[in-house]
Image (cartoon, rainbow, N blue to C red):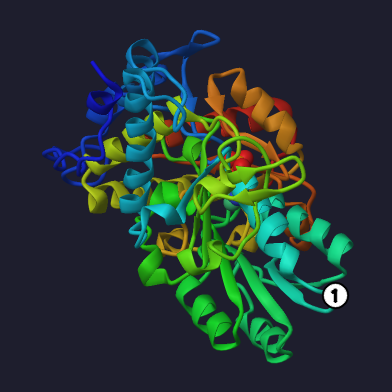
Amino acid sequence: MTATQVRSAEPPMPAREPVGRNGVANFDVDRVREEFPILAEKVYGKPLVYLDSAATSQKPLAVLEAMDTFSKTANANVHRGMHALAEAATDAYEGARKSVQHFLNAKHADEIIFTKSTTEAINLVAKSWGKNLAAGDAIVLTILEHHSNIVPWLQLKDEKKIDVHWIDCDDAGNLNLRTLDEFLAKKKVKLVCVTGLSNVLGTKPDLASIVNRAHAAGARVLVDAAQLAAHEAIDVQKLDCDFLALSGHKIYGPTGIGVLYGKREILKDMPPFLGGGMMIGEVTQDHFTAADPPQRFEAGTPPIAEAVGLHAAIEWMGTLPRSEWEAHERDLVDHAGKVLSAIPGLYILGHQGNQQPANKLTSNKISGCLSFTLEGMHPHDLTDLLGKQGICLRAGHHCTQPLHRRLGITASVRLSVAVYNTKEEIDATAEAIRMIQKKFLSSPQP
Ligand SMILES: Cc1ncc(COP(=O)(O)O)c(C=O)c1O
């Protein structure tokens, strides 16, 4: 079997017939779960409850097998050899690029650059596109950003003496877009960097409005879609963003591969990010010319088997009925909001006071995750105790220290969902928190 047979750039398989369980009619979560071998694992003798997919999602068999088959039957380096394996590997790698192009509805395949991760994709923009910035130019960030979409810009601030402006949010996590307008009015803003979905609050900034406002003022927009891509279909042409970054490992694919989407007309004027093999036109002893994008930005041996895995993940996602999948996840987050907010002393971030009616979370604005604190217990202690029961949640600042500082806390616990989770898992988590509270906190809130 050749790599081309392993993974071609064919259109995705038709959506499978839906069945139905766990809240959303026509969505068979049991059948989905069967495709994730790890979900059958026991942890400390207890069934695994994995509610940490915002950190990394689990991988379906289709992805594991595609990578295995590629490595066993078609492994070679890409864009280098004339032999059969080299051609098969190159076809597989470029087929993966086309699949990402379709996944994001990008106009051209050469607008898709493979990176190691979202982090590397954003660094690529900062270090390459950012070279053209001058002292006094400005970048706008939002308080919701992950450190990946903060630190590269702070590095550029130090290096280029640019200004970095911040958009604040209200207590519910809604961005104050009036501040964006004020920054844009100063005419110095060259780029607005915004997450598509907060990895802490689960809130979604109004990307369409941000892109419109920024473009009207002549600024570019970079969307950090690390979380968004796992929960919603993305159309970069419709969105009209200039750059968009995502990670394979958060969308059911492997670690070690990410994507930078950039508009062709912008990429063509950007200098290389890293230097090395494959990113050149010609090299002499004192000079080199750069290849065209995307190769210009893919120096060295790229993540080939990982690209095959990402292609498989995209095809696998294409087999799920999208609207039922999204409804299922919304149902899970709503359910989590309901059962967790009923726990005395548990406060959901963005829903201060714990007085929110259960249906406050049913808004389409919350996706994928929610975070909370539990009175009397540090988030690390809570997740440690939950972990001993096989329940995996994440604690800490989730690489969003500015946001946590804005919310007046240093850490929180995050519960994040993926297509394979169930309401029973969320109930088990809520029950475990109540038990922990009973056992370790002498006087929980009435
Ligand atoms: C919103 C957001 N941006 C960026 C990242 C960084 O992703 P990676 O570590 O895959 O580069 C994450 C990871 O959690 C994230 O949630």
Q: Residues within 10 Å of mark 1 (few under 14, many from 20)?
A: few
Q: The residue under label 1 is which amino acid type?
A: Ala
Task: Give the residue displayed 54% in from the left and 61% down from the top.
Answer: 267
Q: Nearer the viewer, residue 368 or 335?
A: 368
Task: Give the residue displayed 71% in from the left and 46% down from the top.
Answer: 399
Q: Quadrant of ligand 1?
A: top right
Q: Nearer the viewer, residue 13 or 100?
A: 100
Q: Position of residue 356 (x, y in %)?
A: 53, 63
Residue 116, can we see it? yes
- Residue ID for mark 1: 135
Asked if ligand 1 lies within 8 A of label 1, the reply is no
Task: Give the residue displayed 58% in from the left and 81% down from the top.
Answer: 214
Q: Is residue 113 left or right of residue 176?
A: left
Which residue is at the far bottom?
Answer: 185
Q: Is residue 40 above or below residue 444?
A: above
Task: Give the residue displayed 66% in from the left and 81% down from the top.
Answer: 180
Which residue is at the far left?
Answer: 17
Residue 65, can we see it? no
Q: Nearer the viewer, residue 342 or 384?
A: 384
Q: Is residue 238 left or right of residue 189?
A: left
